[in-house]
Amino acid sequence: MSNPTVKFRPTPAFLLSLGLLLVGVFPFPGGWGRAVRLSLRSPEISRADREQSAGGYYEGLIGVGDGRDELSMRLLGKPANWANIHQIDAIRNLPGDPLQFELKPNIERTLFGRRFSTNAYGLRDRPTTLEKPPGTFRIALLGSSMDMGWGVGTEETYENLLEDWLNAHARKLKLSRRFEVQNFAVAAYSPLNRLESFERKALTFKPDMVIYSSTLLDVRLLEIYLENLLKTRVRPSDPRLLALLDSAGLAAADLRLNGKKDFANKPRVKAKIGPILWPMTDAVVGRLADDCRARGLPLVGVLIPRVSDTDENTRRAEQVARHVGVAARHSVPMIDLSASYDGQDPAELEIATWDDHPNALGHRVLFKGLAAALVKNPDIYTKLFSVPNSSASAGAAREKEAFTDGHDL
């Protein structure tokens, strides 16, 4: 008697996995391959799943985490020679320090075919001096990897494009003022890292204005930061931040580590710190705003997008509203650039199909949006150039003049 034939019926999950495998293995063209990969993703994926996946990417970027997302990133086309910021020897850890890590000074690397360099002070930027030259207006930029410029050359970052334009526009106005935009952004820096960097580093350069960059991934970056803080038993020094952390109700049993030096019950830790992430973000902006006001420093907020379907309009509205609300609560003017990439092909703006950081063109788009917003805001424009620009119509006229001054935008 022969065995009955068993028909194999592939499940949707099997087909999805097979499709991702094939698309990850075969070298399809970037834009088409990206479209296929996106079409293979489940339309029911939740925001939490998307942010968890993105968070895993950033854990990999700075060299922490258990690598659980490595297979999925390989399936989405990540090449074997991709390196995180530790693997290119660009980061030094700071054990027991609330800053946790920083860029090494004076490095020269080639990353994705682009020059990745830092200056003598460990800034992803051009050479500078600690002492501010006479007649110089300094702007401190606080941010994470999009602002640091992951995957683009040092001269291609929106921060350096902005510096070039500010100086070109000042020359057009026949001003003797010279501008320096100093980049204190570091990959995977959370809001708390940015605050630490401002207080310990940026202030030593005597800035005249501060730009605080936020992203729609900030809450996830803050979660990673707090987990590392708790693992190393480092406590925030600010009483407001310390009170928020204590309000999470974490007991000694919650903080027990396993053999991999991760929390033995990580879901419980995440569940307890989850409710404090937005209040902590709010408290950071409040502390920064208070510090800047006390020093007479203008503070400008900017919301920077990823080149990602998860940052599209219908998905980002809630988080954009929260970031704008936080800024408004602390009277910080917010420049919302979250729509900068709407209606454009992501394949032309991201550094790779598997990496949604903006490429050189993506940084140019951000620069144009930021420069236009600075020009149109009469208060900010006056602070930058000491030229009155008191009305909306004047702002529009000034924007047109600024962007036709011969500087290649």
Image (tube, rainbow, N blue to C red):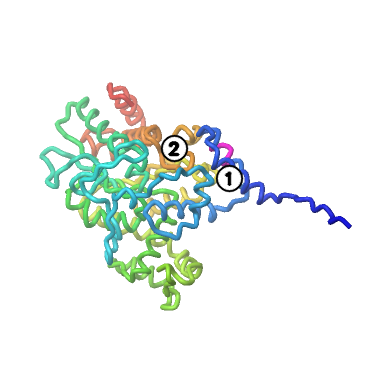
**The C terminus lies in quadrant:** top left
Determine the image quadrant of residue 368. top left
Residue tagged 2:
350
- The x and y percentages for residue 34 are 53, 38
- The x and y percentages for residue 352 are 45, 38
In this orientation, which residue lies closer to the viewer: 406 or 230? 230
Q: Is residue 335 left or right of residue 10?
A: left
Magenta region, residue range: 34-38
Task: Indicate yes or no whether the magenta region holds residue 121.
Answer: no
Q: Is residue 409 visible?
A: yes
Count of numbered circles in the view = 2
The numbered dot on residue 353 is none
Q: Secondary structure at mark 1?
A: helix
Q: Secondary structure at mark 2?
A: strand
How far apart are the alpha carbons under marks 1 and 2?
A: 22 Å
Q: Is residue 379 visible?
A: no
**Residue drawn at 17 percent across, 42 percent down:** 128
Q: Looking at numbered disc 1 in the image, what kind of residue is underneath it?
A: Leu
**The N terminus lies in quadrant:** bottom right
**Residue drawn at 31 percent across, 22 percent down:** 404
Q: Earlier in the sequence, mark 1 or mark 2?
A: 1
Q: Looking at numbered disc 2 in the image, what kind of residue is underneath it?
A: Glu
Looking at the picture, does residue 73 appear above or below residue 134?
A: below
